[in-house]
């Protein structure tokens, strides 16, 4: 995750996104928009920015395809203030597509949950049986708070990437890296409770586990959420969706490398315009 801090309130003044014209344009086009600007109160406290947006076609696809599974992803840290940009995704009959966009001041559980509640209100007929997320305590907590009847799952793609990057980092001191990764994957692939318990014990008996406190601590944080990523605790249809969500990663690559290339230091309003006017319509048409 990223460290977050409040930008100086002066950085938001006369910023295009905070003008009514852009918000009104989106509303006139039929978009659902929830917007609260960041501003300093008389007592010195800062009201945090919140922006949620959903186009009519995104709402239609969320209601059509979001009953089974929705995905939450912090897609981009953009603009000079590095506000958090999140996408909601669903898997359609063709590919994954975004069904909602929101911006929060920070990536805390409280800020994320506040935005998710807006989409829950807009799409009251959508009650996903499952929601998928990366391994982020704040995002997991927000999803469990807002979608109380949904089962939260962790993304296989990011899980495997996180395990590999952590294990191969020299400072973490894992000697038999490939062996440890195979043992972790065996836990993830466990088909029964007995397999899960056996594979977990096998890892705990490995010399790296016995001698490396960092490894024990790292793996223990994952085991706390085992029901969110171990095969035995899911079902076949859900597991296929979880393991084959690379379509989201491809969409994110297109967003970053095509539509947002060179926008790292642009204003956040310019980035949002690129997303809403170009990336979303073109990905929908495709």
Image (cartoon, rainbow, N blue to C red):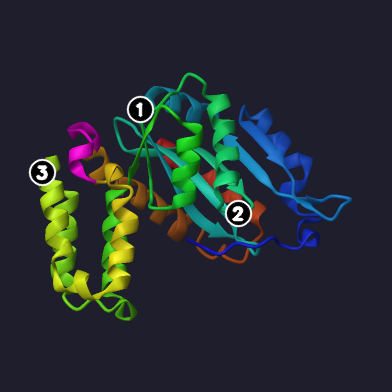
Contact, mark 3 vs mark 1 (Cβ under 8 Å): no
Q: Which residues are magenta?
A: 230-238
What residue is rendered at 34% in x and 51% in y?
250
Q: Nearer the viewer, residue 28 or 88?
A: 88
In this rendering, position of residue 43 left or right of residue 48 = right
Q: Quadrant of the C terminus?
A: top left
Q: Nearer the viewer, residue 173 or 68?
A: 173
In the rendered image, the residue lying farthest to the right is 42
Q: Which residue is mark 3?
A: 194
Q: Which element is circle 3 on? A: helix
Contact, mark 3 vs mark 2 (Cβ under 8 Å): no
> Which callout, 3 or 1, points to the residue nearer the camera?
3
The answer to whether residue 281 of the structure is visible from this angle is no
Q: Which element is circle 1 on? A: loop
The answer to whether residue 139 of the structure is visible from this angle is yes
Count of labels shown? Answer: 3
Residue 78, x across and y down, in percent: 57, 59
Q: Which element is circle 2 on? A: loop
Characterize the local packing of mark 3: few (<14), some (14-19) or many (20 or more) Cα atoms within 10 angstroms: few
Magenta region includes residue 246: no
The overriding secondary structure of the stretch rendered in magenta is helix
Residue 67, x across and y down, in percent: 37, 25
Q: Which residue is mark 2?
A: 106
Q: Nearer the viewer, residue 219 or 188?
A: 219
What residue is rendered at 21% in x and 69% in y?
209
């Amino acid at each position: 995750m990223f460290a977050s801090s409040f930008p100086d309130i002066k950085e938001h003044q006369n910023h295009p996104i905070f003008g009514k014209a852009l918000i009104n344009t989106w509303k006139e086009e039929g978009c659902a928009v929830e917007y609260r600007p960041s501003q300093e109160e008389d007592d010195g406290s800062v009201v945090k920015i919140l922006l949620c947006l959903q186009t009519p076609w995104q709402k239609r696809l969320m209601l059509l395809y979001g009953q089974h599974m929705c995905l939450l992803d912090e897609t981009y840290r953009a603009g000079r203030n590095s506000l958090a940009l999140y996408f909601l995704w669903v898997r359609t009959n063709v590919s994954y597509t975004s069904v909602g966009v929101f911006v929060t001041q920070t990536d805390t559980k409280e800020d994320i949950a506040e935005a998710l509640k807006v989409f829950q209100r807009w799409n009251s007929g959508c009650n996903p049986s499952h929601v998928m997320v990366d391994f982020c305590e704040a995002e997991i907590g927000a999803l469990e708070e807002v979608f109380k009847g949904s089962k939260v799952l962790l993304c296989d793609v990011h899980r495997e990437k996180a395990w590999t990057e952590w294990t191969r980092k020299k400072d973490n001191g894992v000697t038999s890296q490939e062996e440890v990764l195979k043992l972790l994957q065996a836990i993830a692939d466990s088909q029964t409770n007995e397999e899960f318990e056996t594979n977990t014990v096998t890892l705990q008996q490995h010399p790296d586990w016995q001698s490396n406190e960092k490894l024990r601590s790292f793996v223990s944080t994952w085991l706390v959420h085992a029901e969110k990523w171990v095969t035995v605790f899911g079902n076949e249809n859900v597991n296929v969706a979880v393991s084959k969500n690379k379509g989201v990663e491809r969409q994110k690559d297109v967003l970053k490398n095509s539509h947002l290339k060179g926008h790292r230091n642009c204003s956040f309003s310019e980035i949002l315009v690129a997303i809403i006017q170009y990336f979303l319509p073109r990905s929908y048409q495709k």
